Structures are given as C-alpha cells and as structure tokens.
Image (tube, rainbow, N blue to C red):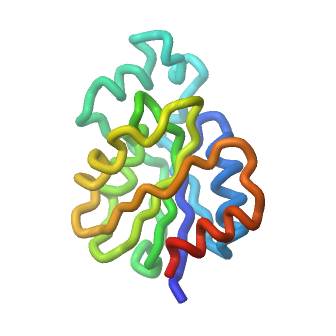
Amino acid sequence: MSKILVAYFSASGVTAKAAKNLAEAAGAELFEIRPAQPYTQADLDWHDENSRSSVEMRDASARPEIAEKVADMGKYDVIFLGFPIWWYVAPHIINTFLESYELSGKKIVLFATSGGSGFGKTIEELKQSCPGAAVTEGKLLNGSPGREELKAFAAKYSK
C-alpha cells in the first residue's frame, strides 16, 4: 500500500478545506505549504498589478520562500498536491515546494480550486520543477465533493 501525503497551499481557506477532506478520505497525512511571509489581503488583490501576487505571477522565476519543509518526504510514494489556480497556473510557491525535494520516482497528483478556469498550462510548468516525478492532472475540487467521491479520486491515483 502506498504512503500518501496531501500537501496544499491555500490563500483563502477554500483549498485547505478540500485538502483536509481529501486527506481524511484517503487516510493520508496532511501538510500545509505556508509562505515564509504570509500573504495579506492586499498581497492577493489580483486587480492591482503591483500587488505581491500579481508581481510574482508575472515573473516565471519567482519562488516565494516556504515557512517549513516536510520532515521526511522520502517516505511518501504518492503526493496529492493542491492549490488555487492563479492566472491559469499554480502559484509559484508550488514550484518552490517541488524544487525543495528530490521527487524522482514519486507520483504527484494535482488537485486545485478555481473560480472558473481549469488547469491551463499547470502540468507543463510544474513538471519542470520536479524532474523524474510522474505528474498527473487530477481534478478540480470546487464546491464540496462528498466523501465517497474523494475516496474514489484518491483510490484511482494511489495504487
């Protein structure tokens, strides 16, 4: 049986709720990807081209520092990686997270929350941050998926 981690970044709490429900349904450990410098509401104002999130997302090389790392990433076979969709891709803190570990041979299953867009070019961009890992587009977990739906989702990718 695979050892599973659900790691997530959540700016507003929506992705956190989805991640917690998924971890519970999958019997997985849970890890929150937190920025070393927390985002304020002003930082997240995507209408402001000078907000922190807007500036970071315009710079493909931006790698916001994370507050802490997973203690023993080596023990996990499958990582469900969740985030909100920003500008049609994952926030760059997800690249920071992936680039912080040796992930060769691991299965990384993406899940996201979004106000309306899909994964866009997320997979292509994230694959560059974890060479040797198998990155798979999982699904959008908008709304409140039920426990059985989450169990089926986890089971599909954790074999």
Q: Which residue is drawn at 30% across and 68% down?
A: 133
Q: In which quarter of the image is residue 100?
A: bottom left
Q: Residue at x 23, y 52 (%)?
A: 128
Number of numbered discs on residues:
0
Query: What residue occupies the far bottom of the structure in this picture?
Result: 1
Name the spot of residue 62 as percent of width and height, x first. Answer: 29, 34
Q: In which quarter of the image is residue 152?
A: bottom right
Quarter occupied by the N terminus: bottom right
Name the spot of residue 4 as percent of width and height, x first. Answer: 54, 75
The residue closer to the viewer here, 88 or 44, is 88
Name the spot of residue 99 as percent of width and height, x first. Answer: 30, 56
2 vs 26: above or below = below
Name the spot of residue 5 as percent of width and height, x first. Answer: 54, 69
154 vs 34: above or below = below
Q: Which residue is drawn at 48% across and 49% down?
A: 67
The residue closer to the viewer here, 135 or 97, is 135
The residue closer to the viewer here, 143 or 10, is 143
Q: Which residue is drawn at 65% across and 48% down?
A: 16
The residue closer to the viewer here, 102 or 133, is 133
33 vs 53: above or below = below
129 vs 155: above or below = above
Q: Is residue 141 left or right of residue 35?
A: right
